[in-house]
């Protein structure tokens, strides 16, 4: 009465199924950031990122 007999078919597909769908994978191209071309939304995002980094560093210590 092994449990393995019940789950064999379910576990066969695990190796062939991708973890990330193809449409969500990045192409590996980095986007350059220019301070001169930044708009208000970019500046706000940068400020939020810096604040999050500081909180993470503070939490680590």
Image (cartoon, grey):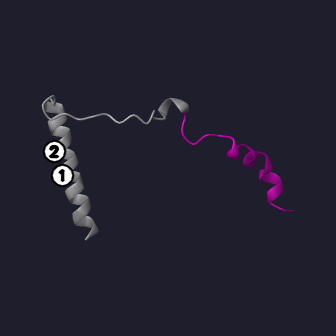
Task: Please tell me whether residue 61 belongs to the stretch shown in magenta.
Answer: no
Residue that mark 2 sits on: 47
Across and down, in percent, residue 7 comes to: 77, 52
Q: Which disc is residue 12 wearing?
A: none
Q: Residue at x 51, y 29 (%)?
A: 23
Q: Which residue is mark 1?
A: 51
Q: Is residue 47 above or below residue 61?
A: above
Give the quarter of the figure containing the N terminus: bottom right
- For disc 1, the neighbor class at 10 Å (few under 14, some 14 to 19, many from 20) is few
Residue at 16% of width from left, 31% of height from top? 38
> In this view of the protein, which residue sits in the foreground, 33 or 10?
33
Is residue 17 shown left or right of residue 12? left
Q: Locate residue 27: give its quadrant.
A: top left
* Contact between labelled residues 2 and 1, with CB atoms less than 8 Å apart: yes
> Dot 2 lies on which element?
helix
- Considering the numbered disc 1 on the image, is that residue within a helix, a strand or a loop? helix
For the residues marked 1 and 2, what is the alpha-carbon distance in whole angstroms? Answer: 6 Å
- Callout 2: 10 Å neighbours few (<14), some, many (20+)? few
Q: Is residue 4 magenta?
A: yes
Residue farthest to the right? 1
The x and y percentages for residue 26 are 45, 35
State the residue at coordinates (57%, 42%). 19
Residue 32 appears in which quarter of the rendering?
A: top left
Q: Position of residue 25 (x, y in %)?
A: 49, 35
Magenta span: 1-21
């Amino acid at each position: 009465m092994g449990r393995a007999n019940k789950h064999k078919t379910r576990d066969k597909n695990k190796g062939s199924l991708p973890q990330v769908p193809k449409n969500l994978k990045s192409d590996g191209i980095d986007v350059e950031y220019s301070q001169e071309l930044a708009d208000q939304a970019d500046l706000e995002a940068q400020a939020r990122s810096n604040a999050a980094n500081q909180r993470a560093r503070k939490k680590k210590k």
